[in-house]
Image (spheres, helix red, strand yellow):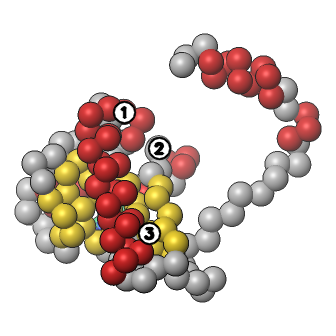
Amino acid sequence: MCVFCQIVEGKIPATKVYEDDAVIAFLDIAQTTKGHTLVVPKKHYDFFLKTPKTIMHRVMDVAQRIGQAQLQTLHAKGVNVLTNNLEAAGQTVFHFHVHVIPRYDARDKLQLEMHENEDRHDLNLPAIAQQLKTKL
Ligand code: 5GP
Ligand code: ZN
């Protein structure tokens, strides 16, 4: 049984922030910033891209509410909401979860940087869009 399923079943402790019939949220043990929270469906799905829409929507609804609460109660200046899909994207626990990470200042332990790809001018954007459209 995965670590988040064990938390859902109360077999290992977690500091819960929210719970309903389908979703729980608890503080991430790493506390990347103060209040870093994980929002998790009670039922096991490996990652966001494999989660049924109704459950995914329930999780995102709670993530939004927690982000709002972080602004209001922890006086965060911003919030990052992110979910890693598969190892190549940094996923380490294979039970769908959304990170809701309050941001306070430049010394935060989370650094998210998106750099321009030097090869971007060689990319055929209409062809890439066409590839994606075939599965949408
Ligand atoms: P991922 O890298 O899969 O997106 O994130 C997994 C997260 O789960 C990490 O931020 C890690 O700190 C957190 N985590 C792993 N094990 C536990 C645990 O037993 N309890 C809690 N509260 N968080 C955990
Ligand atoms: Zn699980």
Residue holding disc 1? 50
The vertical placement of 74 against 22, above or below, is below
> Which residue is more in the foreground, 48 or 2?
48
Say which amino acid is labelled 3. Answer: Ile
- Give the mark, 3 or 1, whose residue is nearer the N terminus: 1
Residue holding disc 3? 101
Which of the numbered marks, if any, corresponds to residue 86?
2
Front: mark 1 or 2? 1
Percent of width and height locating residue 22: 15, 46
Percent of width and height locating residue 45: 28, 39
Residue in the picture at 14% in, 71% down: 13
Residue in the picture at 27% in, 34% down: 54
How dense is the environment of label 3, judged by Cα within 10 Å: few (below 14), some, or many (20 and up)? many
How dense is the environment of label 2, judged by Cα within 10 Å: few (below 14), some, or many (20 and up)? some
Spatial separation of the CA atoms under disc 1 and disc 2: 11 Å
The picture quadrant where one finds residue 52 is top left
Front: mark 3 or 2? 3
> Which residue is more in the foreground, 78 or 37?
78
> Which residue is more in the foreground, 91 or 51?
51
- Report whether 48 appears left or right of 2: right
